[in-house]
Image (spheres, helix red, strand yellow):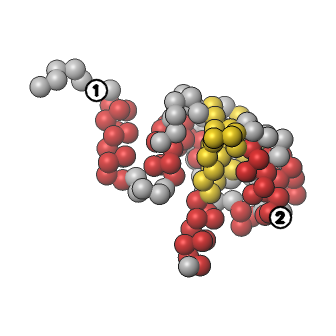
């Protein structure tokens, strides 16, 4: 038997990955990203900076939202942008080819310019990077 004890956080991450994370949820998506990934979180309320940096402490995290919503945990974001809904797509479009991953959990339904916002999110992903919009995925699954 291996006498080397694992750090608690490693055991917790393994437990979450094996017992809680679903194959197509935000947590599973985050676990498959490379170490040091640069992440843009579009619509980063509800403690998303805390969640992402807890799972990937060495990532470079940029969060953007139209308000400072429900941040009850320490905000661990490397960069945190709050802007109005009228300039949301414009603020995202400043980040062309900057991120390994762009994630969004709850956002598109609050945007004034949905098409421009999605286009800006796509442009923010580096070649070979990944975009996962969980709100669009859920909407697409519901409409099938």
Label total for image: 2
Q: Residue 112: which quarter of the image?
A: bottom right
33 with respect to 43 (left or right): left
Q: Is 125 on the left or on the right of 12, as rendered?
A: right
Q: Residue furthest top?
A: 4
Badge 1 crowding class, 10 Å Cα cut-off, few under 14, some 14 to 19, many 20 or more, is few
Percent x, y of residue 83: 82, 48
Query: Which residue appears at 58% of the width and 59% of the height?
Result: 134
The answer to whether residue 53 is above or below residue 89 is above
Q: Secondary structure at mark 1?
A: loop
Task: Name the secondary structure under disc 2.
Answer: loop
User: Residue, x 16% and y 23% (percent of image)?
Assistant: 2
Residue 133 seen in render: yes
| Residue 63 visible at all | no
Question: Which is nearer the N-term, disc 2 or disc 1?
Answer: 1
Q: Is residue 83 above or below residue 58?
A: below
The tag on residue 112 is 2
The residue lying toward the viewer, choosing from 58 and 85, is 58
How far apart marks 2 and 1 lie (CA) works out to 47 Å
Relative height, residue 67 to residue 135 (above, below): above
Residue 27 x/y as whole percent: 47, 49
Residue that lies at the very extreme toward the bottom in this rendered image? 144
Residue located 70% across and 43% down the image: 125
Q: Position of residue 26 (x, y in %)?
A: 51, 52
Mark 1 — residue? 6
């Amino acid at each position: 038997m291996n006498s080397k004890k694992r750090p608690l956080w490693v055991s917790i991450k393994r437990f979450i990955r094996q017992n809680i994370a679903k194959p197509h949820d935000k947590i599973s998506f985050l676990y498959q990203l490379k170490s040091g990934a640069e992440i843009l979180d579009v619509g980063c309320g509800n403690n998303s900076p805390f969640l992402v940096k807890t799972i990937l402490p060495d990532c470079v995290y940029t969060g953007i939202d139209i308000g400072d919503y429900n941040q009850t945990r320490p905000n661990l974001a490397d960069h945190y942008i709050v802007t109005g809904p009228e300039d949301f797509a414009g603020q995202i479009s400043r980040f062309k080819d900057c991120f390994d991953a762009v994630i969004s959990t709850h956002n598109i339904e609050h945007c004034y310019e949905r098409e421009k916002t999605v286009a800006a999110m796509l442009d923010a992903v580096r070649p070979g990077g990944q975009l996962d919009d969980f709100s669009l995925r859920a909407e697409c699954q519901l409409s099938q």
